[in-house]
C-alpha cells in the first residue's frame, strides 16, 4: 500500500529506477533505427556499483551512454541480456532526448529495469531525432551486456491508449482550478481521538447548501506531503515549509472528473496518528475502524451534506473504503476502492512466510505518522500527530504487533476484512490487478463475491495503479479509457439517485492477450475446476527458487523444484478463476517454506507464471490452500506446468530457509477452466504492466526438465465452445440468477386497445428483438430491447388497424438461441 509508483515490489523503498537527466558523457556506441533499418544492437560494460535511492551516475554506481538516431516515429523496444561474475546482473536502462552535442536532456522519455539477467521496455517515440540511451548498474560487479533497440514504425498514438492529460495539480491551491473553496474541521471521537478533515466545497455556495459527499480516509493527506519525510525515498514530494493547503493525492480525480462542479463536496480525513489527527496508528484495527465510522457519520450529518456519502480511495485509503463496506456507518451509500488489501495480515505474510514489507512497511508508516505538517500550519495541526498519549510508545508497539506471523492471533483476526464481508450492503466499485505486485490479489474474490450489494469492478493485467493513471507519454496504465466517467456515473446513481444514461458493464475483465470483455461475475459462471494429479518428489528448502525473472533475487535460479507438466495442448484453453492445491508434506524440522505455481510453457520452453501462492509448513501433514486468481488464455501447442518448491526468492524476500529436504506426495491442484470462448470484446488496450511482465517474467526451462516432468496423466481441458449462453449471471448476493436461460413473453392491451405491451423475463442484460405480427405472418413492427437488472423487459407498440396480434421475441447478437412467443390478442375496429 505504500506509494511506490513503479511496477516493482516494495523493496523499491531502497532502490529507485527513475533519475533525472545524467551528466554529459561520451557515448560508447552510435547507431540509427528507421523503417528501413529497424534494429540496432550493441555490447557494453563492465558496469559496477549499487544505485541507492536514485543516486546520479558516478557516485554509487557507473553508467554508460549510447547515441541513437531515430529516423521515424513509432514504438522503440529496448531489450537486453546481461551477466557478471557474481550472478547479480541487474541493470537500469533509460532513454533521453539529446542535444546537438549528444548530451541527454530533461527527464527520461522511457525507462526500464530488471532484477535478473534479462529485461525489456517499450517507449512511444512521437518525434524522430537524436536520443541518448543511458545504461547504469543497479547492483552488480563488472556487469557486461548485449542489447538491441528495435523500432516499430508508425503513429505511436495508434498503438497506445491515450487519455486526457490531467490539469497541473502541483501548486498548494490546486483546488481553485476545481472550482472549490477549502475549509478545515475536526471530528471528536468517543475515545478522545480528534480527527482532522480537509473539506473542498463548491466555491461561493451558501454554507448550508446541501451536496452529497465523496470522502477519503487515510494516512496520506499530510499538508507537508503524502508520505511525509519518507517522500524522497518514495519518489514523492516533501516540503516541511509548504504553504498550507489540502493534499493533492486525489487531485487527478477531483480535477479530471470535475467532481466539485458536478455538485459534490470532497473531504479528506487523516486517520488517527497521521497528518493533523491525534492518536496512534492502528493498521486497520479497532481504532481505525472507529475512525471510518466517525468520519462517515460526521460527513453525513453536516448542514452542507445531503446525508449521502460515498467513499473513494486507492491502496490504504481503499482499505478504509472496505472497512466502511463491512461496518455500514449511517449515511454510507457507495464505495470505490482501488487496489486495496482484503486481510491486513496477507499484505505482510503468506501464512507465516514473510514478504520484504513485513519488515519495511511498519517502519514506513511509523515514519509517515511521525512526520509533522508544514511549519506554516497552525499549532493544533502541527502537534496532533505527535500526540500518542492514547498509547505511549506507539511506533514501537505498532512495529512489534506486526511482527507476529500467526494469522490466527487476536491482533490479525480483527484486521481480516474477508471474514465479515457478507455484512457488506453498500454498492461497491472495485479495481484489482491480476499482476498486482504491491497489495496482491490475495483473497480478492472471497471478499468481492461475499458482498450482498450491487457490485461493479475492473479486473485486469495491471499492478498498483488507478484507472486514470498514465505514464510519461500519456498512455493509460490500465489501458482503458473512461474510468473517471464510470466512477461518477456510479456516484450519481447511488448518491444522487440519477439513473445512468450509459449502461456500463457489471464487470470489465482484461485477459493476458490484452483484450477486454464484459462479464456478470468473476470467476465466470462457466469456470469449472479440473483436478490435476501432481508428481511426488522432494526439494531443498533453501529459499533459492525464483518464480519469475520479474524481481530481485540474489544467488537464486528460476524453476527449481518438483515439476508436473502437461503434454502440448491440442487446442486453446482459458484459465479463469482461483486454483486450489492440496498436498501431503513431510518435513524433519518445523517451518519449511512451500510455494506452488502454475505456468504457461511455450514451444521454445519459456515458462510464464500465471498463478502462485505459498505458506510455511509448521510440521508434516496435509495442507490445502488457494493460489492467486488470474484470467489467462493458453494457445494450442503450449503446455501447462505446475511447480511445487521452496519460497520464490524474488517474491518472499524475507523467507527464512531451513535447508532441509521437504517431501511432497499425494498432491493435486484444481485448475479453473472456462467452457466457452470469449470472442466479444469491448474497447481497451494492453496494460503497461502486462507488456513489461511478458517481456521480463518468463524464464527458460531445459528440455530435460520438460521431458522428465511431462505427465501422461495430466488431464486435458475440453476444447472451448464457440457460443456462450446469455445466462450464467449472479445477483448482488452471489446466488444464481433466477432468470438464467429463461425467456418468457406476454402481450396485453392498454389505452382503449390501441397500445400493446410485450413484456416478460429474460437473462439479465440480454439483448432482445421483439416482432409484432398481425394475422399469421404479417410483421407490423420490430423493436430492439434489453432485459434489465432483474431480468425484466417491456416493449411498447402503438397500432392503428384492427386485427389479431401476437409477438415473437428472441435473443439477438452472439448470445444463446432462445425464443418465445405470445398468445394472440384482438384489436377491435373503431366505432
Image (cartoon, rainbow, N blue to C red):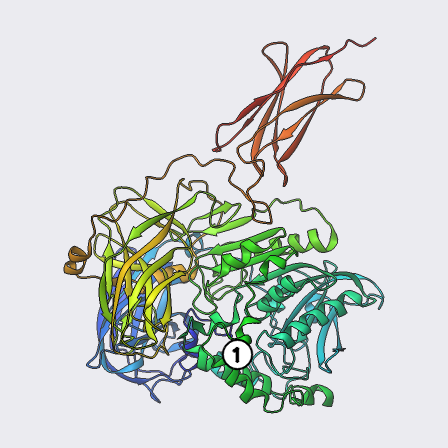
State which quadrant residue 194 falls in: bottom right
Residue at screen point 33% across, 63% down: 596
Q: Is residue 125 visible?
A: no
The residue closer to the viewer here, 396 or 296, is: 396
How busy is the neighbourhood of tag 1: few (under 14 within 10 Å), some, or many (20 plus)? some
Q: Secondary structure at mark 1?
A: loop
Residue at screen point 38% across, 81% down: 22
Vertical position of residue 235 compared to residue 40: above or below? below
Vertical position of residue 675 compared to residue 129: above or below? above
Residue at the extreme left: 704
Question: Relative to residue 354, is residue 698 drawn left or right?
Answer: left
Q: Position of residue 453 (x, y in %)?
A: 63, 52
Question: Relative to residue 60, is residue 746 drawn left or right?
Answer: right
Q: Position of residue 10 (x, y in %)?
A: 43, 75
In the rendered image, which quarter contains the C terminus?
top right
Residue at screen point 68% across, 67% down: 215
Q: Position of residue 603 (x, y in %)?
A: 22, 52
Vertical position of residue 169 compared to residue 34: above or below? below
Report which residue position mark 1 lands on: 236
Q: Position of residue 382 (x, y in %)?
A: 68, 88
- Number of labelled discs? 1
Residue at screen point 45% across, 78% down: 358
State which quadrant residue 697 falls in: bottom left
The residue closer to the viewer here, 309 or 352, is: 352
Q: Is residue 771 visible?
A: yes
Question: Relative to residue 801, is residue 280 drawn left or right?
Answer: left
Amino acid at each position: 500500500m505504500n506509494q511506490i509508483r513503479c511496477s516493482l515490489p516494495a523493496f523499491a523503498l531502497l532502490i529507485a529506477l527513475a533519475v533525472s537527466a545524467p551528466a554529459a558523457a561520451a557515448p560508447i556506441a552510435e547507431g540509427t533505427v528507421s523503417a528501413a533499418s529497424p534494429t540496432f544492437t550493441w555490447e557494453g560494460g563492465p558496469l559496477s556499483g549499487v544505485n541507492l535511492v536514485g543516486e546520479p551516475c558516478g557516485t554509487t554506481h557507473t553508467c554508460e551512454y549510447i547515441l541513437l538516431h531515430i529516423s521515424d516515429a513509432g514504438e522503440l523496444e529496448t531489450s537486453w541480456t546481461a551477466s557478471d561474475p557474481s550472478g547479480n546482473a541487474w541493470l537500469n536502462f533509460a532513454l533521453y532526448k539529446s542535444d546537438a552535442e549528444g548530451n541527454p536532456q530533461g527527464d527520461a522519455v522511457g525507462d526500464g529495469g530488471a532484477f535478473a539477467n534479462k529485461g525489456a521496455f517499450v517507449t512511444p517515440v512521437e518525434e524522430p531525432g537524436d536520443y541518448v540511451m543511458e545504461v547504469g548498474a543497479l547492483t552488480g560487479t563488472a556487469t557486461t551486456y548485449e542489447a538491441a533497440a528495435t523500432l516499430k514504425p508508425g503513429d505511436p498514438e495508434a498503438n497506445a491508449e491515450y487519455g486526457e492529460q490531467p490539469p497541473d495539480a502541483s501548486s498548494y491551491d490546486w483546488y481553485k482550478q476545481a472550482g472549490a473553496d477549502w475549509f478545515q474541521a475536526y471530528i471528536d471521537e468517543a475515545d478522545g481521538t480528534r480527527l482532522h478533515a480537509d473539506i473542498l466545497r463548491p466555491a461561493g455556495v451558501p454554507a448550508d447548501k446541501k451536496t452529497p459527499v465523496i470522502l477519503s480516509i487515510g494516512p496520506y493527506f499530510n499538508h507537508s506531503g503524502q508520505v511525509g519525510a519518507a517522500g524522497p525515498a518514495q519518489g514523492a514530494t516533501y516540503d516541511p515549509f509548504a504553504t498550507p493547503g489540502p493534499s493533492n493525492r486525489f487531485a487527478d480525480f477531483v480535477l479530471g472528473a470535475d467532481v466539485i462542479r458536478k455538485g459534490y463536496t470532497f473531504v479528506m480525513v487523516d486517520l488517527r496518528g497521521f497528518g493533523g489527527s491525534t492518536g496512534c496508528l492502528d493498521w486497520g484495527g479497532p481504532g481505525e475502524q472507529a475512525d471510518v465510522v466517525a468520519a462517515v457519520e460526521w460527513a453525513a450529518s453536516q448542514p452542507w451534506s445531503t446525508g449521502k456519502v460515498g467513499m473513494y480511495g486507492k491502496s490504504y485509503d481503499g482499505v478504509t473504503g472496505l472497512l466502511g463496506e463491512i461496518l455500514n456507518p449511517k449515511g454510507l451509500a457507495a464505495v470505490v476502492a482501488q487496489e486495496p488489501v482484503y486481510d491486513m495480515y496477507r499484505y505482510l505474510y503468506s501464512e507465516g512466510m514473510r514478504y520484504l514489507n513485513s519488515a519495511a512497511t511498519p517502519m514506513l508508516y511509523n515514519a509517515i505518522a511521525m512526520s509533522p505538517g508544514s511549519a506554516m500550519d497552525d499549532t493544533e495541526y502541527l502537534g496532533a500527530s505527535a500526540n500518542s498519549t492514547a498509547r505511549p510508545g506507539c511506533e514501537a508497539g505498532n512495529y512489534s504487533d506486526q511482527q507476529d506471523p500467526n494469522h490466527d492471533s487476536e491482533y490479525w483476526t480483527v484486521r481480516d476484512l474477508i471474514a465479515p464481508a457478507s455484512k457488506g450492503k453498500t454498492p461497491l466499485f472495485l479495481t484489482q490487478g491480476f499482476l498486482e505486485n504491491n497489495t496482491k490479489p490475495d483473497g480478492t474474490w472471497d471478499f468481492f463475491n461475499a458482498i450482498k450489494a450491487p457490485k461493479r469492478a475492473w479486473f485486469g493485467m495491471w499492478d498498483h495503479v488507478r484507472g486514470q493513471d498514465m505514464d510519461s507519454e500519456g498512455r493509460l496504465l490500465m489501458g482503458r479509457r473512461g474510468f473517471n466517467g464510470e466512477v461518477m456515473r456510479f456516484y450519481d446513481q447511488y448518491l444522487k439517485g440519477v439513473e445512468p444514461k450509459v449502461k456500463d458493464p457489471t464487470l470489465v475483465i482484461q485477459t493476458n492477450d490484452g483484450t477486454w470483455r464484459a462479464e456478470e461475475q468473476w470467476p465466470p459462471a462457466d469456470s469449472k475446476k479440473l483436478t490435476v494429479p501432481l508428481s511426488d518428489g522432494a526439494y531443498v528448502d533453501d529459499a533459492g527458487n525464483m518464480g519469475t525473472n520479474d524481481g530481485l533475487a540474489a544467488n537464486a535460479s528460476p524453476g527449481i523444484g518438483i515439476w508436473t507438466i502437461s503434454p502440448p495442448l491440442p487446442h486453446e484453453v482459458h484459465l479463469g478463476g482461483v486454483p486450489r492445491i492440496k498436498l501431503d508434506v513431510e518435513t524433519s524440522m518445523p517451518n519449511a517454506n512451500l510455494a506452488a505455481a502454475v505456468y504457461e510453457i511455450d514451444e521454445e520452453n519459456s515458462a510464464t507464471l500465471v498463478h502462485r501462492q505459498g505458506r510455511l509448513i509448521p510440521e508434516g501433514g496435509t495442507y490445502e490452500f488457494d493460489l492467486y486468481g488470474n484470467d489467462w488464455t493458453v494457445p494450442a501447442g503450449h503446455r501447462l506446468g505446475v511447480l511445487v518448491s521452496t519460497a520464490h526468492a524474488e517474491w518472499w524476500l524475507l523467507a527464512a530457509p531451513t535447508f532441509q529436504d521437504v517431501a511432497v506426495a499425494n498432491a493435486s491442484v484444481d485448475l479453473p477452466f472456462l467452457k466457452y470462448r470469449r470472442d466479444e470484446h469491448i474497447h481497451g488496450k494492453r496494460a503497461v504492466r502486462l507488456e513489461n511482465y511478458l517481456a521480463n517474467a518468463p524464464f527458460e526451462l531445459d528440455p530435460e526438465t520438460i521431458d522428465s516432468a511431462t505427465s501422461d496423466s495430466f488431464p486435458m481441458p475440453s476444447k472451448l465452445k464457440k457460443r456462450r449462453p446469455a445466462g450464467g449471471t449472479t445477483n448482488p448476493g452471489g446466488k444464481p440468477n433466477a432468470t438464467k436461460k429463461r425467456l418468457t413473453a406476454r402481450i396485453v392491451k392498454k389505452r382503449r386497445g390501441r397500445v400493446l405491451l410485450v413484456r416478460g423475463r429474460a437473462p439479465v442484460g440480454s439483448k432482445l428483438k421483439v416482432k409484432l405480427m398481425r394475422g399469421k405472418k404479417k410483421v407490423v413492427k420490430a423493436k430492439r430491447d434489453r432485459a434489465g437488472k432483474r431480468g425484466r423487459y417491456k416493449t411498447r407498440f402503438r397500432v392503428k388497424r384492427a386485427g389479431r396480434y401476437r409477438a415473437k421475441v428472441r435473443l439477438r447478437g452472439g448470445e444463446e438461441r432462445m425464443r418465445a412467443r405470445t398468445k394472440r390478442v384482438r384489436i377491435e375496429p373503431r366505432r
